[in-house]
Image: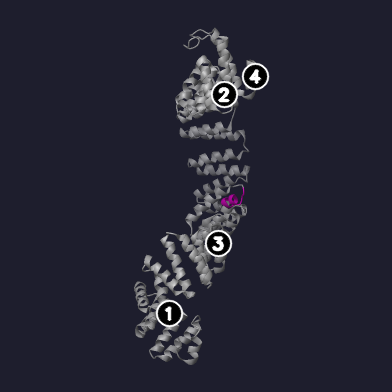
Amino acid sequence: MLKRGLTIVAALCGMVVVSEQSFAQSERRKEKSTPSEMTGAPSLTLSPQEQQLSESYFLEGMKFFMLEEYNKALDRFQRAYAISPTNAAVNYKLAETSLLLGSVRGALPFAKAALELEPSNPYYHLLLAQIYTNQQQYDDAIKVYARLTQELPNTEQYLFNLTDLYLSKNRLDDALRTLEQIEQKYGLIEEISFKKQQIYLKQNKLEQALKEGESLISSNPEEARYLLAQAEILAANKRIADATKMAEKALRVAPDNAYGRLMLADLLQQQGKTAEADAQLELAFGNPVLDIDSKVKILVDYIRRLPNEKVAAQAIKLAELTTRAHPREAKAFAVAGDIYVNADRKLPARDSYLKAVALDPNHFKIWQQIVLLDGEMNQNDSLIAHSERALEFFPNQPMFWFYNGTAHLINKNYPKATKALEYGRRLAGNNLELQLQFNLQLGDAYHSLEQFALSDQAYEAVLALDPNNPHALNNYSYFLSLRGHNLQKAKAMAGTLVAQHPDNPTYLDTYAWVLYKLKEYPEAKRLLEKAVAASSDATIIEHYGDVLYQLGQRELALKQWVRANQVGGASEAISKKIKDKRLYE
């Protein structure tokens, strides 16, 4: 039954075959070996019952090990060890299981014991080397790998591990010797050649590094990667002309190599050959093989150099090549939008951003750019449509409610404006700056709905946060004057505003109109004379005519009304004023 059990476990796990063979071999060796042959361990002779019990614990441990129940496995291996402490396989599994349970210190003595008991088993070398490496005991790990590759046959593959350890200790000459051993066994290998080059470069042995690259190129002259790697080394060592020739040679071999085009473009740019460099960049950007992230990285560098006109032309060309090469990549259109924005081309910027969100709508910042551009271009219908679309994806972002409400306000759809602005104001929470912006718009919207109490509340909220806010001071005081309500407060606010902005015609007109309502016509006239000298706004001109009329200068008043009517945008009463040559309020 025991032998059948061994066969079943062996069939389940290839590693177990090694362990079981080692177990049996170790037991046989203990019966024949002397204490000195066991490296100082006492010779143990187990009774058949003890041997069967030890093997039974070991096999049960292997079962739990394969089921990844490592705590149970460790317990069974420990029981086997208690009976047979000098068995190499038991020590090995104790080390391996301890390591899997995260106990590197617990694993180390058993791994060392396993190797001492059976130095011909490569797995025991490898486990001990792994433990040393995990503990960053690289010198000890090096000794284990060196012993393994020197003493055991068919272990040349572990020379790669030995090389990496030598490199981690900066033992460059030892690493080179080991790499040469690998080449002797396996012949020329790309990875080995590149590693040797890096070592030579660290040793400042440029010619040897280049010679290694030449050997690699000779082995396969049609492999463009080898030529480009050589060009990169030459470029890094300021041999720009030689690097250029090597890159050009690579592109003759592989004309569609986009990365080679990028390298050549950079080399040409370093030599001041801007036109040739740009041509190489265009070939690279038009190639869909060149990944989008590499292109975006280059385009971002162009953005930093904008708004220079010469740079903008090339940046736009590269951005357009990118979108054509990657028509399904949202980031291609997003970076194109950024290029256009920084080149002050708002319409193509907005359109590029729209294509980006059509591919991937979950980008808040891109939607933000879209509505900002709509606003800057005064495309109010687009602003409404795009802000509503953005709100489908970001319903809790107050800025989209702000732009939506503002657009409706401009379109004189005051119910929709107040609804959107009120909702956004609630979302703004404790953000005082946002609260201020929402209240400014709500003040205007509620005034237009003749909900004057709500309008006044909104303006008061703004002035509580920013007592000198020009928008609030101007509109609040002007609207109070139109209503003839609280004119002294209106006068104080308008006076503050003009004191801060004495040359602004709109603010001068507001202050003058408050004074007009207070029948302070001479001062109103003085302010309006200053305003009409700086502005051709019809409302300001008409107000000036009204003041002149009140001061008895009716012919001059009529001239101002006619002028206001010609400019366009005066009040509905302007035609009647002109016809009857009298003031209507």
Question: Relative to residue 45, is residue 493 drawn left or right?
Answer: left
The disc placed on residue 350 is 3
Q: Amino acid at mark 2?
A: Glu
Q: In this view of the protein, which residue sits in the foreground, 24 or 331?
A: 24
Q: Position of residue 439 (x, y in %)?
A: 44, 67
The disc placed on residue 7 is 4
| Residue ID at (47%, 30%) | 168
Instruction: Give the label, 4 or 3, closer to the camera.
Output: 4
Q: What is the distance, in whole Å, between disc 1 and disc 2 at their CAs?
A: 97 Å
Q: What is the distance, in whole Å, between disc 2 and disc 3 at their CAs?
A: 61 Å
Q: Amino acid at mark 3?
A: Arg
Residue for badge 2: 156
Instruction: Give the label, 2 or 3, closer to the camera.
Output: 3
Q: Amino acid at mark 4?
A: Thr
Crowd class of label 4 (few under 14; some 14 to 19; many from 20; radius 10 Å): few
Q: What is the distance, in whole Å, between disc 4 and disc 3 at their CAs?
A: 72 Å
Q: Earlier in the sequence, mark 1 or mark 2?
A: 2
* Mark 4 vs 3: CB contact within 8 A: no
- Image position of 406 with respect to 25: above or below: below
Crowd class of label 2 (few under 14; some 14 to 19; many from 20; radius 10 Å): some
Query: Magenta residues, as a range?
Result: 280-288
Dot 4 lies on which element? helix
Q: Earlier in the sequence, mark 4 or mark 3?
A: 4
Q: What is the distance, in whole Å, between disc 1 and disc 4 at their CAs?
A: 102 Å
Instruction: Give the label, 4 or 2, closer to the camera.
Output: 4
* Mark 2 vs 3: CB contact within 8 A: no
Examine the residues drawn in magenta and state their main secondary structure.
Answer: helix
Residue for badge 1: 483
Q: Amino acid at mark 1?
A: Arg
Q: In this view of the protein, which residue sits in the foreground, 220 or 487?
A: 487
Instruction: Give the label, 1 or 3, closer to the camera.
Output: 1
